[in-house]
Amino acid sequence: MRGARRYGVVAATAALALAGGSALTAPAAAQGQGNPNTSKKFTAAVTADGVYRHLEAFQQIADEHGGNRASGLPGYEASAQYVTDQLEAVGYDVEWQEFEFPFYEELSPTSFQQLSPTPTTYVEQTDFITMTYSGSGTAEGEVVAVDIDLAAGAANTSGCEASDFEGFPEGDVALIQRGTCPFGQKAANAEAAGASGAVIFNSGAPGATDVFAGTLGAPVGIPVVGVSTALGTSLEGAVVQIVTDTVSETRTTWNVIAETEAGRDDNVVMLGAHLDSVSEGAGINDNGSGSAGILEVAIQLAEVKKLNNTVRFAWWGAEELGLIGSYEYVESLGEAELGEIATYLNFDMIASPNYIIGVYDADQSTYEAPVPVPDGSVATEAVFTDYFDSIEQPWVDTEFSGRSDYQPFILAGVPASGLFTGADGVKTEEQVELFGGTAGIIYDPNYHTPEDDITNVDVEALEIMSKAIAHATITLAYDTSAINGKTAPGKSGCAGKSCDRPAAGQGHGMAAA
C-alpha cells in the first residue's frame, strides 16, 4: 500500500496456520473476465457465488475458533489472515494497522433476580440486557433511586454528577434513568459512590420505554444492566441480586487495509466494512456480508488494467465495541491525508433475511442526520440510487444514525454514503410491498445472536447489494468529479467508445448498462 506507513499501519507478519477445508487454504484468483473496466462488465464479474464463498470461509473460521470472529479473540485474527491471503493472491500489498482497545466478553449468562418483596427471576434479552463493559461479580442490595425525573424523560440528568449520589448507602444497587450523559459516566459515578451494581432504565420518553442494550464505553468494576422503563420504575426499594461473569481488559487487534497500485493517490475512493462479529456468534450477516462483498470486489478489481483514482479497501476491527477501528484509522490521518479521500463507502450488513435495499440518506430527504453530512455525500448517494433506478430496483433511504463506520469519516468532513439491508429496525407494510418479507418483525431476526450464521443470509439481497458495490467502485475509480470536482489527468483507463459514461452534467461516472 503506497504511503501506508504514514497512517501508522504496520505490515502483517507470519501467516496464521488455519485448519480446515479448501475455503481457507486456496485463495481465489479473479474470475477471468479479462479487463472488466465498465460497469456492465464489472457487475457481471462480481457475483453472489463469489461473495458467498467468502461467507462460507468466515463460517468455517468461526466454527474452528469458539463460534465467533470477535476482535480480541482468535476468530478475528483468522478472519484477518483469510482476507489477507485472498488479497495477496491477486497481487495486493496488505497492511495491518495495529491498535489497542478495551476488550469485553460475557463468559456466561448474567443472572438478575428480585429477592424481595416479590421474588422474581428476570430473563436476559427479554427483561434486561447486560451493558457492554459491565464489571464481573455479584451485586446484592436494596435498589436506591438516583435523581430520577420521569417528567423530564430523555432530558433528565440522573446519575450524571457525583453529587447525585450524595449519601448513597454503600453496597446497595443504584437505580438510574437513561438520559443526557453517557452510560459509562453514570456507572462510574455509581461505582465511586460505593454502589455494588447499577440498573439503568429507559428514559420513558416517546419511543424510549423498552429494554435496551448499551455500552459503558470502557470497563467499570460493578455489574450494570439495562431495563425497560416499566421494570426500572417498579424496582425502587426492592432487594435485588445481579451476578455477572465478564472479562473487560485491554487487548490488541487490527484494521486490514489494501489499495490498488493504479490510480492517482491524491484522489482515493475508499470502501470499508467491519470484519469483527459480536462474541455471541459467527456474524455472517453482521458483518461477514459487507466484508465478503468488498473482498470480492477487490479481487475482481485486480483484473482492471488502468484506473484513474486509487481504490482503497478497509476491514475494520472492534466495530462492535464502539467503531473503534475506523476511529483509530481516521484519527491517524493528517488533514492533507483526509483531504485525499474523495469519498467513503460503508457496507455493514448486506444480506439481512428480512431485508430492505437501503442507501444512506446523504441528501436527508427522509432522515435528518444527527451530525452535518459533508458536501459531496449527496453525489455519492446518487451513484447508488441512479444505479438502482437504472435497473428498476426499488430502494429506500436509511439513516446516518452514527451506528456504523461512516461516522468517523463524516465527522472528519469526508463525503460518505453506502448500503444497508437492515438490523434491528422493524419492517413496514410499505417495505414489504417493495422487497417482500414480513412486516412487524426486524430486518435481521438473528442480529447479534448465535443464529447469525451461514444458514440465515438472504442470497438475493447479497446479489443485489454486491453488484451495486461493484458499480459504485468501478464508476468512482474512473470519475469522482461530481463529488469533489477532481478529474483524472491524462488518458482515461477506459478510452473512447468503451467508456459507457453518462452525458456531461450527469456526473456519476459510468452508466449502469
Image (tube, rainbow, N blue to C red):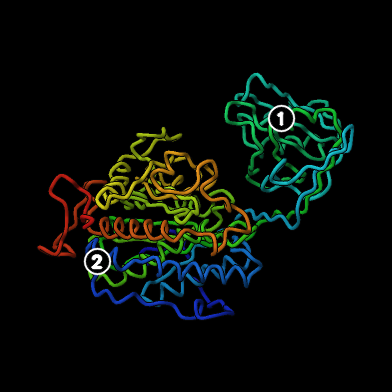
Q: Secondary structure at mark 2?
A: helix
Residue type, numbered disc 1: Ala
Q: Look at 69% across and 30% down and name the residue there.
A: 229
Question: Mark 2 = which residue?
Answer: 41
Query: Can you give x and y, in whole percent of width and height, for residue 49 in the image?
Result: 40, 69
Image position of 87 with respect to 398: above or below: below
Q: Position of residue 138 (x, y in %)?
A: 84, 46
- The answer to whether 15 appears left or right of 279 in the picture is left
Disc 1/disc 2 C-alpha distance (Å): 56 Å
Position of 291 relative to 211 (above/below): below
Categorize mark 2 by other alpha carbons within 10 Å: few (<14), some (14-19), many (20+). some
Q: Quadrant of the N terminus?
A: bottom left
Residue underneath mark 1: 230
Q: Is residue 165 visible?
A: no
Residue 501 falls in image quadrant:
bottom left
Of residues 14 and 211, the one nearer the viewer is: 211
